[in-house]
Image (spheres, rainbow, N blue to C red):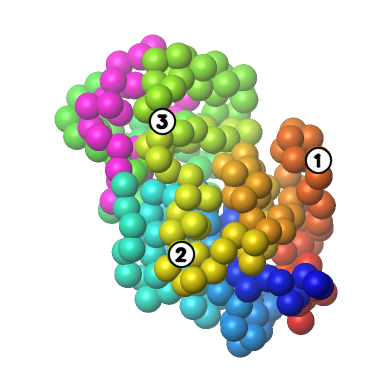
């Protein structure tokens, strides 16, 4: 059976995958996705971004899309109806901030309507220049409510984040899922949260199975998703370590070369 006949559901990450290096959707990608919608493919975007942030981006496709956000902690329907949500409890998150975290690391709590951080981080802000999801600078030593969707740390030195990951997991391996969406982005979610789990909920709702899906990703927060889908592609701009982890998967053009749209156009349109 050829790929076009088998696949009914198209799933893509955002940053480093559907978006170019300017964090934009190209006109070509938009046109391809509109054509895929016209041909009745189910479209899913699965991202580490917060839903308010991602919704402002995905709306630019001008076609119906299921949205999995915060690595699976939220699912929204194409009509922006909240279908699923799970948060991390305040006491558990607060206990992480009681650890000795390097003050140079930017720490972020992703909450429902805003994000709280200890630093103004220009690189982080550049990911969300047009978003209505805005940062609030806080002192985590004085914060009372730590309940959040996702916990996020960023620093230009990857090893500092690896050390922090090991420090946290030594105490909370059974409490959190973690992922490096990029080498400088370390994320923690509730243990039950993963993109693949959220995608499975959508497939069940729409009466599809994983064998009927194709997915595209570039980060370690995409790993389980890429392993779960019937067909999976790694972006040419993905870190070599991800390619080495999933050596059986095909690598396609980079995000700046419209890799997702080009592949889909060649294989499905």
Q: Which residue is mark 3?
A: 176
As drawn, 31 above or below 16: below
Specify which label sits upstream in the sequence, 1 or 3: 3
Q: Which residue is mark 1?
A: 247
Seen from the viewer's position, the closer of residues 175 and 15 is: 175
Mark 3: which secondary structure? strand
Query: x and y percent of residue 97 in the render?
Result: 32, 21
In what quadrant of the picture does the C terminus appear? bottom right
Q: Residue furthest bottom?
A: 38
Mark 2: which secondary structure? helix
Judged left or right of residue 28, residue 126 is: left
Q: Which residue is mark 2?
A: 204
Q: Residue at x 44, y 59 (%)?
A: 201
As drawn, 219 above or below 82: above
Q: Residue at x 49, y 33 (%)?
A: 178
In what quadrant of the picture does the N terminus appear? bottom right
Q: CA distance from mark 1 to mark 2?
A: 29 Å
**Residue 224, picture quadrant:** top right
Q: Are marks 3 and 2 in contact (CB under 8 Å)?
A: no
Task: Give the mark count.
Answer: 3
* Dot 3 alpha-carbon crowd within 10 angstroms: few under 14, some 14 to 19, many 20 or more: many
As drawn, 243 above or below 153: below
Query: x and y percent of residue 53 in the render?
Result: 43, 58
Specify which label sits upstream in the sequence, 3 or 2: 3
Magenta part of the chain: 87-112
Residue 2: say if magenta.
Answer: no
Residue 99: say if magenta.
Answer: yes
Q: CA distance from mark 1 to mark 3?
A: 27 Å
């Amino acid at each position: 059976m050829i790929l076009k006949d088998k696949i009914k559901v198209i799933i893509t990450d955002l940053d480093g995958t559907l978006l170019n290096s300017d964090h934009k959707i190209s006109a070509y990608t938009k046109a391809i996705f509109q054509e895929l919608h016209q041909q009745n493919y189910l479209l899913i975007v699965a991202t580490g971004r917060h839903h308010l942030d991602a919704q402002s981006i995905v709306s630019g496709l001008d076609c119906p899309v299921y949205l999995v956000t915060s690595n699976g902690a939220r699912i929204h329907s194409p009509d922006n109806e909240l279908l699923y949500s799970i948060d991390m409890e305040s006491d558990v998150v607060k206990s992480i901030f009681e650890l000795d975290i390097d003050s140079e690391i930017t720490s972020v709590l992703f909450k429902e309507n805003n994000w709280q951080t200890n630093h103004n981080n220009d690189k982080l802000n550049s990911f969300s220049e047009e978003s209505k999801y805005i940062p609030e600078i806080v002192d985590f030593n004085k914060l009372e409510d730590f309940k959040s969707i996702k916990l996020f740390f960023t620093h230009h030195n990857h090893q500092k984040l690896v050390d922090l990951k090991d420090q946290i997991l030594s105490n909370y391996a059974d409490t959190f899922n973690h992922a490096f969406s990029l080498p400088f982005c370390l994320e923690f979610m509730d243990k039950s949260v993963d993109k693949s789990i959220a995608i499975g909920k959508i497939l069940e709702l729409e009466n599809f199975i994983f064998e009927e899906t194709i997915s595209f990703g570039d980060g370690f927060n995409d790993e389980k998703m890429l392993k779960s889908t019937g067909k999976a592609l790694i972006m040419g701009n993905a870190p070599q370590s991800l390619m080495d982890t999933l050596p059986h998967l095909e690598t396609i053009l980079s995000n700046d070369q419209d890799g997702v749209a080009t592949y889909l156009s060649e294989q499905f349109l």
